Image (spheres, rainbow, N blue to C red):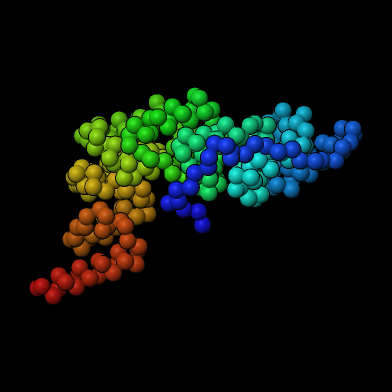
Amino acid sequence: MLTCGLKLQLPPQTLLKPTSTAVPTTKDGGLLFRQKLLYLQSLNINPHKALNQNPSLRSTPLSSLLSLEVSLSSFGLSRPSIGRILDMYPLLLTSDPLPPINFLLQEVPLPLPHLPLSLSRCPRLLLSSVATQLRPTLRFLTSLGLVLNCRTTLLLASNVENTLKPKLNFLQSLGFDEPEVNRMVVRSPGLLTLSLENNMKPKVKFFLEEMEGELEELKRFPQYFSFSLDKKIKPRHRALVEHGFKLPLSKMLKVSDGEFNARLIEMRLQRVQRT
């Protein structure tokens, strides 16, 4: 299993470049096209979807597709992963993945063994412009104090003005100052992946109005936002209220259902013993 704790880095001189792969030579256009379709199917790529979303694929030689697979596999991606990524984003079949890959390895910098997990979590990184998307977003994220790893590089595909800043502004509108918000994000980077309208706002509303919580507690436990409102936060809060108990957010949410129920029973027994 890949982890984000390794500190390996890839020296600039060892960055890989696409290599050509020998393919059958024939001048029969129909046969060449069929070979290309069969190759896509061998990767579990839907040819109809790929051609529909990327018309230039029709004129792309099979040798280029083979070279793309070799290049991606040389960075540690398995063949099933390559097929899944290319099926999700057929435009990648005719694009150059090396600029964003080299950016991740050199400028983030992401250790080479962590690259497959980073790309599997967010294949859209491979379609992102280094100059206009990845590099400016990296500067913004590092200005917050974030150090990116294989699980948070997906944030690089986010729009700073339309996606990231509104979430930070919302937290500040609650009464947190900028350094406090930055610390919350560093402690829980997943905050920046959540929907503002469908996730953050409803959870804050429930926390302040139903739970009568204090903002200081959200500062201490920003992970609150990562738990399901309907499946975990609401039922556990209501179970506590039903029995007249209250727990800090961390103790209420971080444990499994079994542990929470056991804790609830324990608190009820302790109350009986005191009476």
Quarter residue 158 falls in? top left
Front residue of 178/136: it is: 136
* Residue nearer the viewer, 200 or 272: 200
- Left or right of 21? Residue 228 is left
- Residue displayed at 20% across by 69% down: 268
Is residue 211 placed above or below 274 in the rendered structure? above
**Image height check: is 22 above or below 163?**
below
Is residue 209 among the parts visible in the rendering? Answer: no
- The spot of residue 48 in percent (x, y) is 72, 38
Q: Which of the pair 268/147 is nearer the observer?
A: 147
Closer to the camera, 187 or 34?
187
**Count of residue discs:** 0
| View extreme (top): residue | 132
In the figure, is residue 8 to the left or right of 274?
right
Residue 262 seen in this snapshot:
yes
Q: Where is residue 144 in the image (x, y as percent from the top left)?
A: 33, 34
* Outermost residue, bottom side: 273
Q: Residue at x 72, y 28 (%)?
A: 56
Q: Which residue is drawn at 37% across and 50% down?
A: 228
Question: Residue 89: where, in percent of width, then height?
Answer: 61, 37
**Which percent across, then down, holds residue 275?**
9, 73
Q: Which residue is drawn at 27% across and 40% down?
A: 183
Q: In this view, does 160 lie to the left or right of 20?
A: left
